[in-house]
Image (cartoon, rainbow, N blue to C red):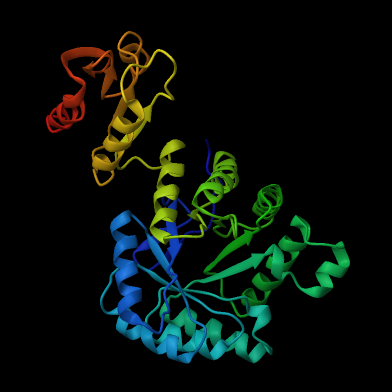
Amino acid sequence: MKRRQTKEVKVGSVNIGGNAGISIQSMTNTDTRNPEATLEQIWRLEEAGCDLVRMAVPDMDAAYSISKIRGRTKIPLVADIHFDYRIALECIDRGVDKIRINPGNIGEDRRVREVSRAAKEKGVPIRIGVNSGSIEKELLDKYGSPTPEAMVESAIRHVRLLEEHDFTDIIISLKASNVPMMIEAYRLISQKVDYPLHLGVTEAGTIWSGTIKSSIGIGTLLMDGIGDTIRVSLTGDPVEEVKVGIQILKSLGLRKNGIELISCPTCGRCQIDLINIANTVEQKLQNSNKNIKVAVMGCAVNGPGEAREADIGIAGGNGVGLIFKKGEIIKKVPEDKLVDALMEELETI
């Protein structure tokens, strides 16, 4: 797939847009005024493979905590701010790498100018985030309801306010809980601006339903070549957002680091406990950085052939299983030794 060419924006140590890879973001659900709890979650997100972490900054006390957080992690930090330009200025001064604020919501032009100037001096990009549930009243009156066109017009309004102050380190998001609306909004704006786009289905739901909606929405746009950074929004542990995001990128061939696991869905021919074996293998491999494909198949007759493209894998039979590499059988072991044998062979790759 051919990526849409966008302006490159630097967020701390991470580049977004241009020729940079697609980065994965998440957001803490701790109280930012509690720096220890927030840091613990940031460290977990970083370990899971998150590239940038966003934090809610609802008041000045939360902004003051940024200093305590910034000094103890190297991952780029994003401050999520609504309405109050003074909080934005404080966060910029305390070392955040990006702020999320809509300039049209912070009042008079003087305030927009102050935020733009401070952000430009410190090299802090601004993400404009338009959600279908927070479109301006006059745009809702114009279009009759939240629509992709209304979302795009709202975003362009905010962009122009920053551009009037010669600020162009801008990233845009157009999120909706309705997947078709979200997809159409991003497609429309990708034809109008060359700023990097942050993809996401907002309020996607629980881990199960939210993963499905996010995979469809984000995956569809990435296949169109649209999108420079992503966040999977799930109700639950934010580490799960990172895991899903990584899997979306790996499934599309957009991220190579880490093992890709394939496994068959099982059928009436399966004579081993494949579901348990596949889950065990996935758990053991979740922190591996090997760039290989591992297959867990349930049929010892067809498994090696069906998974021929895998670097290594196992295929089960009646109480026994086969270990194979590149489709070639290398050994036969009892079912209860399959996972251990696979792990041993993985060490040789």
Q: Does residue 156 appear in the picture of this structure?
A: no
229 lies left or right of 74: right
141 lies left or right of 128: right
Quadrant where the C terminus lies? top left
Q: Residue at x 48, y 85 (%)?
A: 118
**Picture coordinates of residue 50, whole percent (x, y):** 36, 58
Q: Residue at x 13, y 33 (%)?
A: 347
State the residue in front, 86 or 243: 243
175 lies left or right of 81: right
Q: Quadrant of residue 15?
A: bottom left
State the residue in front, 88 or 217: 217
Measured along the vertical axis of the image, is residue 265 above or below residue 167? Answer: above
Q: Residue at x 34, y 68 (%)?
A: 41
State the residue in front, 96 or 124: 96
Count all numbered tags in the image, as a single digit: 0
Q: Quadrant of residue 159?
A: bottom right
Q: Residue at x 40, y 63 (%)?
A: 52
